[in-house]
Amino acid sequence: MKKRALIIEDNENNMELITFILDAYGYETLMAVTGREGYERAVAELPDFVILDIQLPDILGTEVLQMLRATPTTAHIPVIAMTSFAMAGDEERLLAAGCDGYIEKPINPDNVMERIGQIIEVEK
Amino acid sequence: MADNAGMRGKLPEGGPGICRSVCRVCILVLSVFFGSVVDSAANTTVPVRVGLYENRPKIYMDEADVAAGFFPALIDGIARREGWDVKYVPGSWPECMERLERGEIDLMPDVAMTPERRDVYTFSDETALISWAVVYARSGLNVSSFFDLEDKRIALLRGSVYHTGPHSLCSIMEQFNIPATFVEYDSYLEVFQGIESGAADAGVVNNIFGSYAEEKFQVERTPIVFSPSRLHFAFPKDSGRTRALKEGVDRQLREMKADATSEYHEAIDTHLYGAPQREMDAEVDFTAEEKAWLRAHPDIRLGFDPEFFPFEFLDDRGRFSGIASDYVDILEDQFGVKMRALTGLDWSEVMNKVARREVDVLACVGQSAERSGYLLFSKPYCAFHRVILTRTDMPFITGVSDLAGMRVGVQKSSSHDAYLRENTGLSFTTYPTVKEAVLALSGGKIDALIGNLSSCTFWIRRLNLTNLKIAAPASSEVYTLHFAVRRDWPELVGIINKCLDHISEIEQNKIQQRWVGLEYEPEATRRVAWRVAIRTTLIAAVVLGAAMLWLGRLKQEISRRKKVEAELLYFADELTEANVKLEEMDRLKNMFIASVSHELRTPLNSIIGFSGVLLKGMTGELTEKQKDQLSRIHSSARHLLELITDIIDISKIEAGAVDVHPASFLLQEVITECEDSIQPQLAAKPLSLSTDIPENVELHTDRKRLRQCLLNYLSNAVKYSEQGDIRVTVRRLSDDRIRISVSDTGIGIAEDDIPRLFQPFERMDSHLRVKAGGTGLGLYLTRKIVTDILQGEIHVESVKGQGSVFSLTIPRNVRTPPASGSAGATEEEGAG
């Protein structure tokens, strides 16, 4: 069975890029463009993992994360944060907030799947 | 004593010193043969040995090793008159005093007379000079009383009256129970050097040396003065020559002091004043025509501005007063040129009357083209600065050109009025008096006022207006003030000019000092102050006791200091305000760049991501040409992204919006990570990488930032080396400091280029620039990170063509700064 990824991302181009790569590697992709919509889809569809942009138009990515963690049915779903060239301290901050890992923008198609694979693998 | 040899024995062969000393010797020899009275005890066959030490400008050894200064000039005069042969014996002050006590020298000039010393030495009856101690401090130490010297290190001249005895600083400090450390030096020069180098916080020198040398050192004169002393000549107590020498000195000093043209006064003028003075000539040679003209014009009507402080004004008792009035007094008392000051007129009325020739002379006016139409101007005799005043809430202005569109005011019929009309196209409002103009500005009726710095400052203070500031100079020129005479009386201009020529510099300084204090000619004030101080001292030496002088001087100094300080504070406030604004603007600029750059990254991420996907062939096979061109897009976009990221980093660091994220880790781990990251580039060249790192170097600092810097050093090393070895070395410098160095065998950097290395966008050797790539911001950013975040320093050593060593020295434990409010910026950074 195909693994299902929920991508929460407001930038259309980024969304197209990440879904294209995931599709190419045989994942099923679900999409949400706001934090609230992302949370609702996660609860409704229970994806295998979530890729979460940290800057969203309505609520902060970290808040979405907290909401997912606070809901029993989604609490265990791995969440991968997507950040722009993570700056000093961001990594720690995101992991402390409960992320399972992060990938950097710009997305590098050469290794992004490897990275996602590692993060999900560890969570199993 | 080994160095008992005279000065002349030490002279180098040839050179100008030889000639000078030969001349002196000739004079001495001549005086031996032709000297009228030769005292037998002080006979020329045995030279008079004089102690020579360093105490500029009173006594010192010049570049040609010849004794120079006030005392040698004076002693030469005495020697000539007494028929002595003089030999100078150089040494430090304490050495000289010891030699004098042992009779190894016969005479010491410049010795303060104290009861203790009178037990040891014999003193001349005549005083040569009066001097006192002045405390100088390191700039910025803010010493205003003895109490500010608590726990400070104070430099003193060993063995001086300021060092030992009842009037010494040590004893004063003890009386006040103020603890301090005293550092001893052998000359005043060393005292100043000690303050400058930081070896001492403050130091004591005499007033004459202080005035002479203060500008050459980073020292600040404090208001503290003490221990006025009479400087005498001292002789050994038990020497058989002493009596004759002492009598000779006293006799000649008495005579010289009484004679204004003597060597004594000449020495004061030359060595203490800085330049010979022209003597005042009270007799002016008026021509017969001029005398006739003066007789024919017994009533010269003088107009003045009743509110042109301090140049001319009506004082509280309704009398003509100010600088101009002093000059008018001199014209009248010394030269017999009588003028009648017209009181009861305001300035506009005066100017109207001048035009109608109901006033003949103006005492103190600036020149303007318009006024030249009906007035003739004398030589200038004082000066002022023209400035622009605004309210403190007004925007920053830089000069008259910024005043367009503003409501500008000026005193009617003043030179400023004419200046604006003749030099600018501004429209403006006029006011009868400066006072009214200043009040109009303060009250918001006008936005800017052009006026004279002195008059405006005076009224601002007098009216206690706190909302006004001196915004900018109206021009950099200094304007001169003159007597102005009705055009049909050119004879009077000639007469006034003649008188002005005959007023001595001393007299002019006195007037200046009396009315202006020291604020109007900043470049000339020190010299003026110094001259006045010394002249005052000399007069006081005859008339007043030392105590009176001390008190007077102290008061004068305090009030001068207060005045200067008030002005400095005013300008300091202005500057601080401007600086705060600038800093805030700079911070905003940096934040702006950081956030704009952030927005630039979003589209770049798409370009890089999609071109990456295409290059990977995920959308289908590409032709070689397509692949080549696409990879150019891809790498250019990456380059641009690096550039933007560096700019964001720099802007944030400069805006102070970067937090330190300290963590504990082993240095080895970070270096290994960097090695891994650099591996691909390293593998592309015949380069090896080795390390020399002590075990278990634990750090507590910002790990990511350190990694960023090391990676930058390493990638530069790889970029600029074609072959050889790159080496990472770590050394513990102390318990808390380590140095990490990255050395390469690359192209190296020319010494001249090293300072440019850490400037943004500076890359050496342009052909490599193309080849090496990179943003040109790397080292600049590295330096910023190391200094601003890691709290360390960077170093670079390089030999062109052989390689470079880039190092950074950082504390092992970074100091955690107080919590800052920049968390928001970090928050935004994580987004994307």
Image: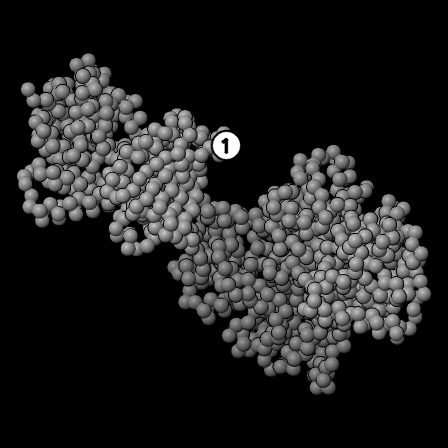
Percent x, y for residue B332?
73, 72
In the shown orientation, is residue A124 left or right of residue B452? left
Vertical arrangement, residue B494 with respect to residue B122, above or below:
below
Residue drawn at (43%, 46%) of the image = B797
Residue B559, horizontal then vertical, whole percent? 68, 50
Q: Chain of mark 1?
A: B
- The answer to whether residue B391 of the structure is visible from this angle is yes
Residue sitting at 57 percent across and 47 percent down?
Answer: B569
Q: Secondary structure at mark 1?
A: loop
Relative horizontal placement of residue B254, taking residue B342 as reference (left or right):
right
Q: Nearer the viewer, residue B588 or B202?
A: B202
The x, y position of residue B9, in whole percent, is 76, 62
What is the quadrant of residue A36 in the picture? top left
Say which quadrant the C terminus of chain B sits in.
top left
Q: What residue lies at 15% left-to-right and 29% top-to-bottom? A: A113
Q: Which x, y percent locates residue B334? A: 75, 72
Answer above or below: position of A113 versus B654.
above
**Which amino acid type is shown beneath numbered disc 1?**
Ser
